[in-house]
Image: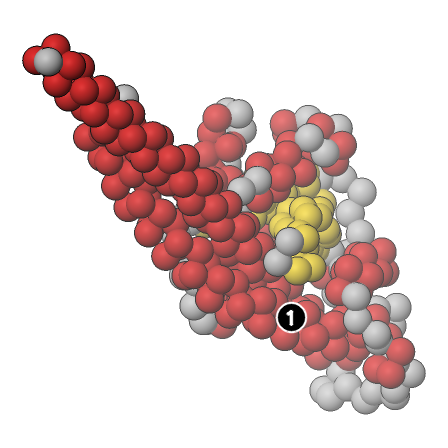
Amino acid sequence: MSLLEIKKKIGGVKNTRKITKAMQLVAASKRLQFQRKALSTREFVAAQLSVLNQNLNSDAQSVYTEKRSKGYTTFVLYSSDKGLCGALNNKLIKALFDSKQWLELDESQRKLIVIGKKALAAANSRKVPVFKEFTKLSENMSELQALEIVSELISVYLNPECKEVKLIAPHYKNSFTFYPVVKTFLPFSQEMLDSHLGSLEMNLEARSNSYMLFEPNAEVVLDKLYEQISQALFLQALYELKASEYSSRMIAMKNATESADKIIKNLTLDLNKSRQAAITQEIAELAGAQAAME
């Protein structure tokens, strides 16, 4: 490799490093933003679920707690719209398509709703029919926008032919640890509450054993609470997805920047060696020419 080629390669790697470093800093900033949202939403969801946990077995009847023995299962698969976020999307996709809950059902017994372009692409590549798709969701989604999507998810469950709705989303622990989970979204049951409350890792003892009076009645209040909790669970999963996405991207770009530094260092060594070899050759040629003249 000539000196000119090495210089061009060093320049190209340095330009790439500037991009990866900038993406790393942006991802780190976004990660903090969504980490705060995810953790604060957890506390809100935990408070609501603890209230519901005390009243789930009350005499109030609701379609949101209806147990259905027959019907199809609707899976809601979360993913990012963009790449460069490590193995996050692959883990989420495998968590669904390799799960017993998915494989044990016939095609007529399951429906798929995707959130994010990567989930849509994965479904298309596997030739899995997509019932509904939500892509290009705003990162600063308002409660009204979230309510519109949740309303569509609830409408899917309100169809008597739908047995249950499950979410496949990441559980965010910290910048380096997040893993996919499959949770029941609807209907509400004691098993569903225990699953969500356990994963929230919150201490709920102080919130229990309080007497509650419902106005106008328990059925009306609990129905509204079911809708509100559904919206909160959807937003919580979305925020944890974004926190996991930007954490993965931050780590991926950090590794790419470090790799670029190593390549630049090695190329610089090659450049110095080539320069030294060229100088040595020139000296040898001059010495040879001088000896010939003598």
Q: Secondary structure at mark 1?
A: helix
The residue under the point 37% across, 40% down is 264
**Classed neighbour count for the residue bearing mark 1: other residues with Cα under 10 Å, few (<14), some (14–19), many (≥20):** some
- Say left or right for 255 vs 158: left
Residue 40 seen from this side: yes
- The residue identified by callout 1 is 39
The residue lying furthest to the left in this view is: 293
The residue under the point 84% across, 82% down is 207
Residue 114 seen from this side: no
Q: On the rendered image, what quadrant is the N terminus found in?
A: top left
Find residue 16 and report its image quarter: top left
Q: Nearer the viewer, residue 84 or 146?
A: 84
In the rendered image, residue 278, in percent from the top left (x then y), is placed at 23, 25
Q: Nearer the viewer, residue 74 or 63?
A: 74
Find residue 117 and report its image quarter: top left
Examine the rendered structure and indicate whether residue 217 appears above or below residue 181: below
The residue under the point 53% across, 68% down is 32
Examine the rendered structure and indicate whether residue 66 appears above or below residue 276: below
In the rendered image, residue 289, in percent from the top left (x then y), is placed at 12, 15
The residue under the point 51% across, 32% down is 123
The residue lying furthest to the right in this view is: 209
The residue lying furthest to the front in this view is: 294
In the rendered image, residue 111, in percent from the top left (x then y), is placed at 60, 38
Q: Label 1 amino acid?
A: Leu
In the rendered image, residue 20, in percent from the top left (x then y), is placed at 39, 49
Q: Nearer the viewer, residue 137 or 106?
A: 137
Examine the rendered structure and indicate whether residue 288 appears above or below residue 225: above
Q: How many marks?
A: 1
Q: On the rendered image, what quadrant is the C terminus found in?
A: top left
- Say left or right for 37 vs 68: left
Examine the rendered structure and indicate whether residue 262 appears above or below residue 227: above
